[in-house]
Image (cartoon, rainbow, N blue to C red):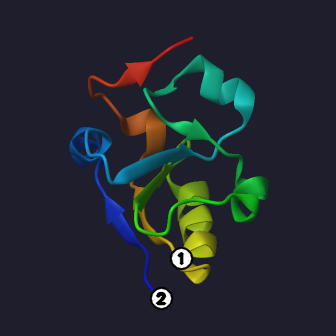
């Protein structure tokens, strides 16, 4: 199955929706440095252990886009509706960037 992707420019629109969950699949240290405000941090190796609402769209991102595609593939196989962000957090220049 092909994984749907979105551009970093589309991310802000998805982040404002109530029917979307945004997940950052990077490690905790990288997440704390910068992430999309409101995103959950679930590392790639733990992605299949999470329990999410099946009715919501899951948007995944990582550093550049490869790990989020892998995570999206795993979740899609488990029945989730998923999209991966092309370019990851490195390409994101929107207004929802949080730095701790």
Q: Nearer the viewer, mark 1 or mark 2?
A: 1
Q: Residues within 10 Å of mark 1 (few under 14, many from 20)?
A: some
Quadrant for the C terminus in the image: top right
Residue at the image point whose x is 22% and y is 43% from the top: 9
- Residue under label 2, please give it: 1
Residue at the image point whose x is 35% and y is 34% from the top: 92
Residue at the image point whose x is 30% and y is 28% from the top: 93
Front position in the image: 53 or 15: 53
The answer to which image quadrant residue 63 occupies is: top right
- Residue under label 1, please give it: 76
Instruction: Judge from the rendering whether residue 5 lies leftward or rightward of residue 89; answer left or right.
Output: left
Query: Where in the figure is residue 76, as x and y percent of width and height?
Result: 53, 76
Secondary structure type for disc 2: loop
Instruction: Judge from the rendering whether residue 25 lies leftward or rightward of residue 11; answer left or right.
Output: right
Front position in the image: 75 or 19: 19
On screen, residue 7 above or below 71: above
On screen, residue 31 above or below 54: above
- Mark-to-mark CA distance, 1 and 2: 8 Å
Residue at the image point whose x is 63% and y is 21% from the top: 32
Q: Residues within 10 Å of mark 2 (few under 14, many from 20)?
A: few
Secondary structure type for disc 1: helix
Instruction: Check if mark 1's residue and mark 2's residue have beta carbons within 8 Å.
Output: yes
Q: How many marks?
A: 2
Query: Where in the figure is residue 80, as x and y percent of width and height?
Result: 50, 72
């Amino acid at each position: 199955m092909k994984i749907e992707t979105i551009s970093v420019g589309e991310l802000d629109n998805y982040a404002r929706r109530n029917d979307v969950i945004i997940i950052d699949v990077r490690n905790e240290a990288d997440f704390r440095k910068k992430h999309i405000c409101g995103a959950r941090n679930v590392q790639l190796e733990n992605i299949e252990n999470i329990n999410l609402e099946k009715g919501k769209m899951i948007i995944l991102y990582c550093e550049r886009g490869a790990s989020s595609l892998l995570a999206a593939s795993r979740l899609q196989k488990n029945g989730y509706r998923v999209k991966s962000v092309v370019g990851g957090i490195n390409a994101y220049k929107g207004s929802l960037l949080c730095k701790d």
